[in-house]
Amino acid sequence: MALAVEEGAVEELLAEVPTLPRFLSAAELDEASLALAREHPGDVRVRRFGHTAHGDALIGLEVGDGEKVALLVGAPHPNEPLGTLTALHLARALARKESLTRRLGARFFLIPAIDRDGLRLNEGWMTHPGFSLSRFAHHYYRPPARQQVEWGFPYYADAYDFSSVPPETEALAHLIDTLRPSLIFSLHNSTTGGVFYYLNRPIERLQELLVDHPRQLGLPLEPAVPEEPWGSILSPFILKSLSTHEAVQYLLEHNLDPRRVLTHGAGSIEYGESVNPNVLGMMAEVPLFPDPRSGDSTEAPVDRTSLEAERHQRRERVVNLLRSAHHTLQREGVLRPGTFRDCLESSLEFQSRREGLAPIPSPEGPVTVSEVFRNQITARFTDLRLLGTLYRFIGEQAAPGTFAREGLLRSTEDQIEHVAQGLEGNLKGRRAPLVDLVRAQMAAGLHALRYLA
């Protein structure tokens, strides 16, 4: 049963989002959530539904009393904090528009931050009022795939299984079992480019609405390009949500051992489908630095072979820096268990696990501005994240005052500054107001209510 989202209701709720100066810390999100519940007693219910690996309570906000449940999950990856604001301010808007919320006929369960522990490790760049790419790199954290809440759901098959479920994922899985949501909306963000989406099934009119709203907000769209060879496209700006089952089938069909390639479990949408086969699953990737070049189909005077070769050479240089630093500290016998050691070794392992996997085919026809952007700008952001992981690994592992620490940190900082300055010069003035990015994500979730089974 589709819900009654009245004409103008989406805009009315979006208008409730205030100007947002910066992202909030995990503690500030808690404070804001509890304050919202105090401000709207009975209309906003605080639900504690589990604990993080470090023992913090996982908090959700429940608003509305409809039969259909819409589950929105912020910070599914802790380096992607936009959804923390989207979940919090959608709860706020729904509470302030009580009569409209009743007419929507949905019960919303909004999780500002599912990976709270990881979010804390990004607070050095997130909560700082003056964003810089250098600061972003120095305080960047993203867990290995096997530890990611988004991709940590249990998966069992003859050819591949995953049972090392993070406690946050276990809590979210239990919540999905209990709520049996009709909508699971995982709130992601990218660093640069345009808005694009993942859906678990094609819905033509919803796809049209998802494309229209960013344009109304002045945000560019990014052409759908599968990030894995088993990925597929539903429409020009919308990808089909990735599935571990489809990954396993693809690898078997290509005579590859899934255990050799994969390290993660099922995704949140895939797990939701096992609980409610009719669930609508969606992700919205909204960029912090919107850039219309990401969707520019104008022909670029560039040779594709040279363009891709240059990108591969840059990445190889960065990966070699990671290998070299790891080898140096390993040789000196100082390596010990640590968060950033796991991250760095996972990044190196990823490279070897991809060997033998067919690359995603290059586009046909002339090289476009969009393709140049992906190879020269988007790819450099990945380089910057790898360098940030390297910087924090060295700081975690090497003893203060040693040549290994100071020399490696200095050379890594030089590389970070080189990449950051090049990107900042290229992206100058392109950071969008957070309020517009939050409204884009909120609009997608509200439009989806019309198309619940």
Image: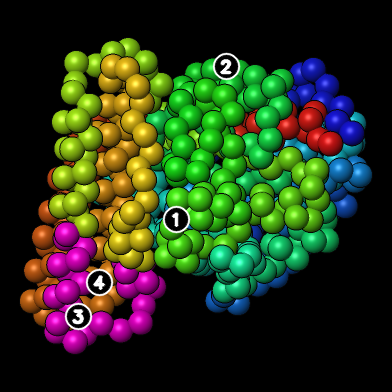
| Inter-mark Cα distance, 3 to 2 | 53 Å
Mark closer to the chain start, 1 or 3: 1
Residue 395, disc: 4
Type of amino acid at the residue the image marks with label 4: Gly
| Inter-mark Cα distance, 1 to 4 | 41 Å
| Inter-mark Cα distance, 2 to 4 | 44 Å
Q: Position of residue 68 (x, y in %)?
A: 86, 43
Foreground of the two, 388 or 139? 388
Q: Residues within 10 Å of mark 4 (few under 14, many from 20)?
A: some
| Residue, disc 2 | 216
Foreground of the two, 28 or 404? 404
| Residue, disc 1 | 255
The magenta stretch spans residue 398: no
Type of amino acid at the residue the image marks with label 3: Gln
Type of amino acid at the residue the image marks with label 2: Gln
Name the outermost residue toward the bottom: 333
Residue 330, disc: 3
Q: Is residue 195 above or below residue 191?
A: above
Q: Residue at x 45, y 50 (%)?
A: 254
